[in-house]
Image (spheres, grey):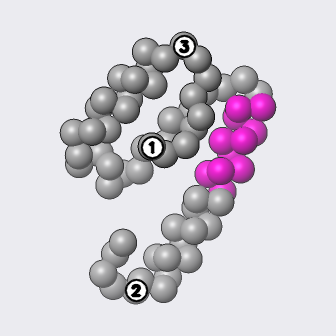
Amino acid sequence: MPKTNVEYWTAKIGRNRARDAEHLKVLRSDGWRALVLWECELRRPRYERRLVRFLENENPARGERE
């Protein structure tokens, strides 16, 4: 969470998550798989494992954050 303007960012992140959930729902209903990675996650090595698991998995992904 950002340290400045917390109220603004909390609301914005909440709206983004709601929008993303709706988009994921539509994608899944159309037969797509989706993986959500937030920019802040890219600084951690764990995202690489999530990406590899997602790409190797032939079953539909949940599209959720782990």
The answer for how far apart the CA atoms under marks 3 and 1 are is 18 Å
Give x and y (percent) for residue 14: 57, 68
Q: Write the residue at 51% across / 35% down.
A: 35
**Residues packed near mark 3 inside 10 Å, few (<14), some (14 to 19) or many (20 plus):** few
Which mark, residue 14? none
- Label 1: state its secondary structure: loop
Give x and y (percent) for residue 59: 58, 17
**Which residue corresponds to mark 1?**
66
Quadrant where the N terminus is found in the figure: bottom left
Residue type (three-letter) at the residue carrying disc 3:
Glu
Q: Nearer the viewer, residue 11 or 50?
A: 50
Q: Nearer the viewer, residue 17 or 61?
A: 61
Residue type (three-letter) at the residue carrying disc 1:
Glu
Q: Using the rendered view, name the quadrant where residue 25 is placed.
A: top right
Give x and y (percent) for residue 45: 21, 39
The answer for how far apart the CA atoms under marks 3 and 2 are is 42 Å
Residue type (three-letter) at the residue carrying disc 2:
Asn
**Which residue corresponds to mark 3?**
58
The magenta region covers: 19-29
Q: Earlier in the sequence, mark 3 or mark 1?
A: 3
**Which residue corresponds to mark 2?**
5
**Residues packed near mark 2 inside 10 Å, few (<14), some (14 to 19) or many (20 plus):** few
Quadrant where the C terminus is found in the figure: top left
Q: Earlier in the sequence, mark 3 or mark 2?
A: 2
